[in-house]
Image (spheres, helix red, strand yellow):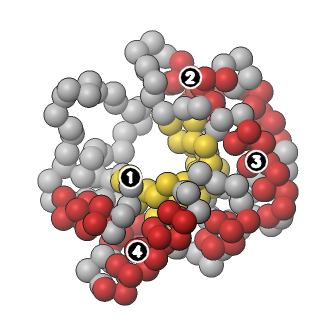
Amino acid sequence: VAEKVLKRMRAPGAGLLKMAINVSGASLGDDTYVENLLKMTSGSPEERKRLIVEVTETSALADLEAANRRLAALRETGIKVCIDDFGAGATSYDYVRKLPVDAVKIDGDLVGGLGDPMTQGLIRGFVDLCRSMKLETIAEMIETDQVADQLKALGVEYGQGWLFGRAEAEPRTQLASAAPIRRRGAVEAWG
């Protein structure tokens, strides 16, 4: 995946495209993944500033101390680190507390529950916590303008989801002056 992302970032017309790579706890289980990513980007420090590594909670990190060291090595070179699916698992708070990260992506299940005042309170609390730690906040699975507006009112800084564009095999770039690509209406399935 990292090779494909770097190939796309290096393609003509990519400009300053930033891209994220999801990395599982298993990939951070030893030094191999980090060493290979740093080797692949060693010729271009500017590329590193355009990469984001998203640590997923699909499998918990067995050794947080070792993962901390590996993620710190990425950050030292300019690669940003984000915790993906924050709020979905029991390890979220441990990750924020013990890992060197730049951003937190709020899980889509929480975003989908914005109609519940308790969920709104949880998201507001997450945002306040992240702000106090100087971490960026991103919400996923945003499908309507109403949800985007609610999240913005709660203090969430960035968003992703079908409202902004359908997931595609290759990223599309558009001129800043062009009208944003926006989807209307909610869809319950992501297939």
The x, y position of residue 54, in whole percent, is 59, 51
| Closer to us: 44 or 184 | 44
Q: Comparing marks 3 and 2, which lies closer to the viewer?
A: 3
Residue 160 shown left or right of residue 49 in the figure: left
What amino acid type should be assigned to the residue bearing mark 4? Answer: Arg
Question: Which numbered marker is on residue 7?
Answer: 2
Spatial CA span between label 4 and label 3: 28 Å
Q: Name the residue under label 4.
A: 124
Spatial CA span between label 1 and label 3: 23 Å
> Which badge, 1 or 3, comes first in the chain's sequence?
3
The quadrant holding residue 79 is top right
Neighbor class of circle 4 (other Cα within 10 Å; few <14, some 14-19, many 20+) is some
Element under disc 3: helix
Question: Which numbered marker is on residue 113?
Answer: none
Neighbor class of circle 3 (other Cα within 10 Å; few <14, some 14-19, many 20+) is some
The x, y position of residue 157, in whole percent, is 39, 55
Spatial CA span between label 1 and label 2: 25 Å
What amino acid type should be assigned to the residue bearing mark 1? Answer: Tyr
